[in-house]
Image (cartoon, grey):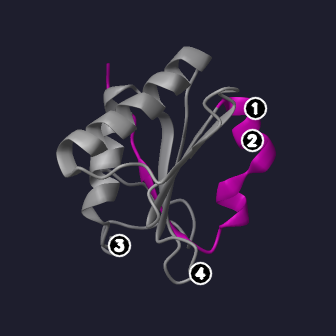
């Protein structure tokens, strides 16, 4: 997992948070479908709602649907775990896949900028995942 450090809340190579196996599997599924600006927010010290938020965006409605479908299929196939709650597949502006301890947010660019989850949770340890080359 590649990381960059751009602020004190960002992780650094020497201070890498322990990511759950489910987080790694979800990241792989998102990268397979070329998720853009992929970030993992470790919110375990900030809330009891969940342990991790995974935030990314897709460049089109088709890609957003493909990202969401790939995550749900891969996780079910590899772990047997089903998504607990799924929202937003109809509009494809903001899709939420809730796995209880990990919540995946897949946005289009405009909606991501408007809601700015990373700014709202800026006290979280944020791991930026580099885009995989084509």
Q: Name above or below for residue 107 compared with residue 79.
A: above
The quadrant where residue 76 appears: top left
Q: Residue furthest left?
A: 78
Residue lying at 28% horizontally and 53% vertically, measured from the top left: 24
Q: CA distance from mark 2 to mark 4?
A: 22 Å
Residue lying at 29% horizontally and 45% vertically, measured from the top left: 75
Tell which circle, 4 or 3, labels the residue nearer the N-terminal end.
Answer: 3
Mark 4 lies on residue = 46
Q: Name above or below for residue 99 compared with residue 28.
A: below
Q: Secondary structure at mark 3?
A: loop
Q: CA distance from mark 1 to mark 4?
A: 26 Å
* Camera-nearest residue between 98 and 119: 98
Are circles 2 and 4 on residues that touch, CB within 8 Å?
no
Q: CA distance from mark 2 to mark 1?
A: 5 Å
Mark 2 lies on residue = 113
Q: CA distance from mark 4 to mark 3?
A: 14 Å
Please rate how many residues cluster around mark 2, counting C-alpha atoms within 10 Å: few if below 14, some from 14 to 19, many from 20. few
Q: CA distance from mark 1 to mark 3?
A: 29 Å
Mark 1 lies on residue = 110
Residues drawn in magenta: 108-134
Mark 3 lies on residue = 17
* Camera-nearest residue between 70 and 121: 70
One can see residue 25 in this view: yes
- Give the side of residue 119 with respect to residue 72, left or right: right
Tell which circle, 2 or 4, labels the residue nearer the N-terminal end.
Answer: 4
């Amino acid at each position: 997992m590649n990381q960059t450090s751009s602020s004190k809340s960002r992780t650094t190579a020497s201070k890498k948070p322990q990511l759950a196996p489910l987080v790694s599997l979800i990241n792989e599924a998102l990268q397979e479908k070329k998720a853009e600006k992929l970030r993992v927010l470790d919110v375990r010290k900030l809330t009891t709602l969940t342990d991790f938020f995974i935030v990314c965006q897709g460049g089109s409605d088709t890609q957003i649907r493909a990202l969401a479908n790939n995550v749900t299929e891969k996780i079910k196939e590899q772990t047997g775990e089903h998504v607990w709650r799924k929202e937003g597949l109809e509009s494809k502006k903001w899709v939420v896949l809730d796995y209880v301890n990990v919540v995946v947010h897949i946005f289009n660019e405009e909606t991501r900028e408007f809601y700015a989850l990373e700014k709202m949770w800026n006290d979280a340890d944020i791991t930026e995942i580099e885009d995989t080359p084509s």
